[in-house]
Amino acid sequence: EPEVTQTPSHQVTQMGQEVILRCVPISNHLYFYWYRQILGQKVEFLVSFYNNEISEKSEIFDDQFSVERPDGSNFTLKIRSTKLEDSAMYFCASSGRGPNYGYTFGSGTRLTVV
Amino acid sequence: GDSVTQMEGPVTLSEEAFLTINCTYTATGYPSLFWYVQYPGEGLQLLLKATKADDKGSNKGFEATYRKETTSFHLEKGSVQVSDSAVYFCALVPSGNTPLVFGKGTRLSVIA
């Protein structure tokens, strides 16, 4: 069964550093998403991406965050200057026919900011 | 705004017990409803879905029925197993291409 692949599985970074989280969505999917889950809390929407541009973003997705689909297969989330409160599990997801048909999520990247 | 409310966990059951995890929603229009499951150390997996009123989603012995009159989508399983221990998330897509909105999740522990 096709999978969404995320790398790395765990990243530790110092406060103020830039991090890039990488995702390979399912190859024929058109809609891409990033969510995050702070430990023990709910899964929160960050951003959606369609047709090579951001289609929607939440209040969490401020100027410190950016997304790219640099080469037609990878989908990246960049945090420019990490803060302690960015520590969370970050999930990438993709959907082939729009959100009503359910997303396929990756296994997540656990980001720890120290 | 659109939201999902799930029963508080954790829920602890003995093997073969009946499971219900309550989920209610608030949404304008006609949302699609989902249950996702997160096994320990893993990502989110779609468990089942329903896209219109009175639809029943089912998978792996789990069921949920889209009840528009009560704005609910309760998850049920007749006989749980230890391997069902996980966190269960109720979620909705409000309409069109709007993003998935999750509930807080309910942790289920099944003991032998």
Image: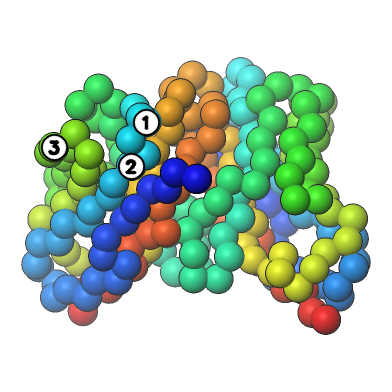
Measuring 62% from the left and 28% from the top, which residue is drawn there?
B32
Q: Chain ID for label 1?
A: A
Q: Secondary structure at mark 1?
A: loop
Using the image as rendered, state which of residue A27 and residue B2 is in the foreground. Answer: A27
Identity of the amino acid at label 2? Pro
Measuring 16% from the left and 57% from the top, which residue is drawn there?
A20
Q: Secondary structure at mark 2?
A: loop
Identity of the amino acid at label 1? His
How far apart are the alpha carbons under marks 3 and 2? 12 Å
Report whether mark 2 lies on the same chain as mark 1: yes
Q: Quadrant of the C terminus of chain A?
A: bottom left
Of the image marks 3 and 2, the number of the one nearer the N terminus: 2
How far apart are the alpha carbons under marks 3 and 1? 14 Å
Measuring 16% from the left and 52% from the top, which residue is drawn there?
A78
Residue A27 location in percent, x, y?
A: 33, 35
Q: Which residue is mark 3?
A: A71
Residue A85 location in percent, x, y?
A: 28, 66
Q: Residue furthest front?
A: A1
Q: How many marks?
A: 3
* Pointers 3 and 2 in contact (C-beta within 8 Å): no
How far apart are the alpha carbons under marks 2 and 1? 7 Å
Q: Quadrant of residue A33?
A: top left
Q: Chain ID for label 3?
A: A
Give the label on residue A29, or none. 1
* Pointers 2 and 1 in contact (C-beta within 8 Å): yes
Q: Which residue is mark 2?
A: A25
Measuring 19% from the left and 66% from the top, which residue is drawn there?
A83
Identity of the amino acid at label 3? Asp
Tell me, yes or no, if residue A42 can be seen here.
yes
Give the label on residue A57, or none. none
Left or right? Give the position of A17 relative to A69: left
Classed neighbour count for the residue bearing mark 2: other residues with Cα under 10 Å, few (<14), some (14–19), many (≥20): many
